[in-house]
Amino acid sequence: VQLQASGGGLVQAGGSLRLSCSATGISINEYTMRWHRQAPGKQRELVASITKEKIQSYAGGVEGRFTISRDNAENSVYLQMNSLKPEDTGVYYCDAQRLFYRYWGQGTQVTVSS
């Protein structure tokens, strides 16, 4: 099983990025998919999640700016990030969970300059 995250980069504050996480080895349609991030020197934190029923939830600091979505046909999950802030800087990871099975991707770096 592999989760390949991509789409990170360097962007100015106020800009946008769209992250993608493409899965191989599983069909994500039965999985809850999540995006997490880890800022330098901090613990990894949950950013957003989307259930197999497409119910979304967000951390308080990103609600209204970030949108998580999924395309089961593409076996992928996305994170549209708008109005980015320097505090959004970090490595972004995706994960897939179903029952006792949980898989993590390798992360993609997002850097927001002020």
Image (spheres, grey):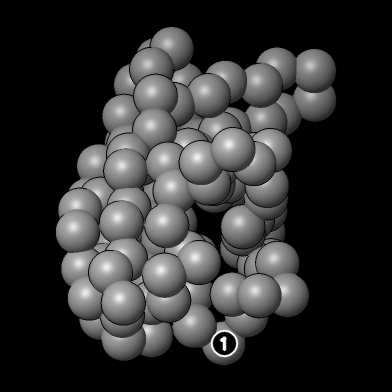
Image position, residue 54 (x, y; %): 61, 63
Most distant residue in the right direction? 99
Q: Quadrant of the C terminus?
A: bottom left
Residue marked by disc 1: 64
- Counting from the top left corner in percent of width and height, residue 108 is at 32, 39
Tell me the element at label 1. Answer: loop
Under mark 1, the amino acid is Gly
On the picture, is 44 further left or further right than 77?
Answer: right
Residue 13 in sight from this viewpoint = yes
In the image, what residue occupies the spot 49% across and 74% down?
A: 66
**Residue at position x 22%, y 76% in the image:** 12
Q: Is residue 27 left or right of residue 108?
A: right
Residue 51: x and y in percent read 67, 53
For the N terminus, which image quadrant?
top left
Q: Residues within 10 Å of mark 1 (few under 14, many from 20)?
A: few
> Seen in the image, is 30 located left or right of residue 88?
right
**Front residue (pair 34, 38):** 38
When the figure is inspected, residue 90 is found, relative to residue 2, above or below; the finding is below
Measured as percent of width and height from the top left, residue 11 is found at 21, 68
In this rendered view, identify the residue nearer to me: 6 or 69: 6
Asked if 23 appears above or below 24 in the picture, the reply is: below
- Say which residue appears at 53% left-offset and 24% top-offset: 104
- The quadrant in which residue 70 appears is bottom left
- Using the rendered view, name the quadrant where residue 50 is placed: bottom right
Above or below, 53 relative to 29: below
Q: Nearer the viewer, residue 58 or 85?
A: 85
Q: Quadrant of residue 111?
A: bottom left
